[in-house]
Amino acid sequence: MDLDAFRTLLTPAGRGALDEAVKILADGADPVAAASAMRRGHPADLAAAALTQASLRRRAEAKFGPDAAVMYFTPHGLEQATRPEVAAHRAARIRATGTRATGIRAAGEPEGGPAVLDVCSGIGGDLVALARAGCPVHAVDLDPLTVEVARANAAALGLSSLVDVRTGDAALADPAGYGLLFADPARRGARGRTFDPMAYSPTWPVVLDLVARAPAACLKVAPGIPYEFIPEGAEAEWVSYRGEVKEAAIWTGLGPGVRRATLLPSGATLTASGAEAETGPVSRYLYEPDGAAVRAHLVGEVAALVSGRLLDPRIAYITSDRLVRTEWAPCYEVTDVMPFSLKRLRAALRERRVGVVTIKKRGSAVDVERLRKDLRLSGDNSCVIVLTRIEERPFALLCRPATSTDG
């Protein structure tokens, strides 16, 4: 879909075609039938654009919920857009900073959060959350189509008075007149997703130059960002949503630098305290720290919460004699511990009549799907298999979800 085709969707005729395409797909028409039906009443290019947008809206429902029904997307923009719960968490933190600068503010608009310069704004997932938090946003993106989509999304959600979106090069932006710089550099190139900040667009040196000229900044980065790329004195926050690490954010200009992990939707947060976990043998309970805590190097802090110790100093599994309820780590009761052997593991599961397994691993090179087939499961019972390494030796732990309360 090109810029002209998208603009056509915003006309009355385009909106009508899009509404029709949404209904056709909702009725279950296959792609060929849907295209034929649309072309009977609309030009071929408009029919194709409407069907593409209707399909993207259906895909977006899982991420954007009810908002997807009125928003606009591009395939790449939808993929890279921040999940609304994560964007809202970040926007709430930005509003709470109390930072103020000249920025933009519509006439008569009440005081809200700081004025934000959003570079590399994409389709507008973050600028929507920022505007909803009361932050006036000036957004720039290098791609004219993406800019048009972001502008349309602000309008569709009733946020135009707080949002100004323009085509521009992030490297040429001046963050000095704003309360905060928000940057979401593109992490996908011609060969797919990149994990090297030097391959971001704009590149990491350009991003850091913008940060150096901003009173405060928030940078959205991949969860696997190498620690050496985090500026000295900055806060690095890893965010997990319902047990899955979604992204990391680097914060500057807002206080002392810490390592932080945050869980959503609860909003629970954990910061570095200097806790160091000891190592020891497998006890009754096994804890699996949330990935945000692992990425933030806060496994020692989680171990302290459950009075636990590590099975191996390099692997994020914690064992304890106590059952402590914490959202930072699902807990399992260990029933069997054995050196890893396919034959022995298969025999143990057969003896226990296990037909359904959940396989977890950390520090193991075992191919999980191949193992699942090789186990030849049969039976009515279920089991959690944890594959790990203890002192360089592979082990399998048979577990079940912990259900009792520690006294």
Image (tube, helix red, strand yellow):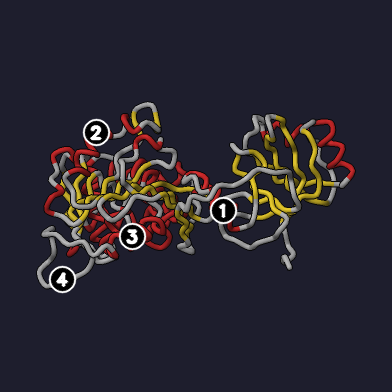
Does residue 338 appear to the left or right of 324 in the view shown?
right
For disc 1, the neighbor class at 10 Å (few under 14, some 14 to 19, many from 20) is many
Q: Position of residue 189 (x, y in %)?
A: 34, 30
User: How far apart are labels 2 and 4 at the CA level?
Assistant: 36 Å
Instruction: Give the number of the mark in front: 2 or 1.
Output: 1
Q: Is residue 395 above or below residue 233?
A: above
Q: Earlier in the sequence, mark 2 or mark 4?
A: 4
- Image quarter hosting the C terminus: bottom right
At 18% from the left edge and 71% from the top edge, which residue is drawn? 111
User: Mark 1 belongs to which amino acid?
Assistant: Val
Residue 70, label in figure: 3
User: Mark 3 belongs to which amino acid?
Assistant: Val
For disc 3, the neighbor class at 10 Å (few under 14, some 14 to 19, many from 20) is few
Q: Earlier in the sequence, mark 2 or mark 3?
A: 3
The answer to whether any part of residue 224 appears in the image is yes
Q: Position of residue 184 (x, y in %)?
A: 30, 44
User: Mark 2 belongs to which amino acid?
Assistant: Pro
Instruction: Give the number of the mark in front: 1 or 3.
Output: 1
Question: What residue does disc 1 label?
Answer: 302
Instruction: Give the number of the mark in front: 2 or 3.
Output: 2
Q: Position of residue 117 (x, y in %)?
A: 19, 52
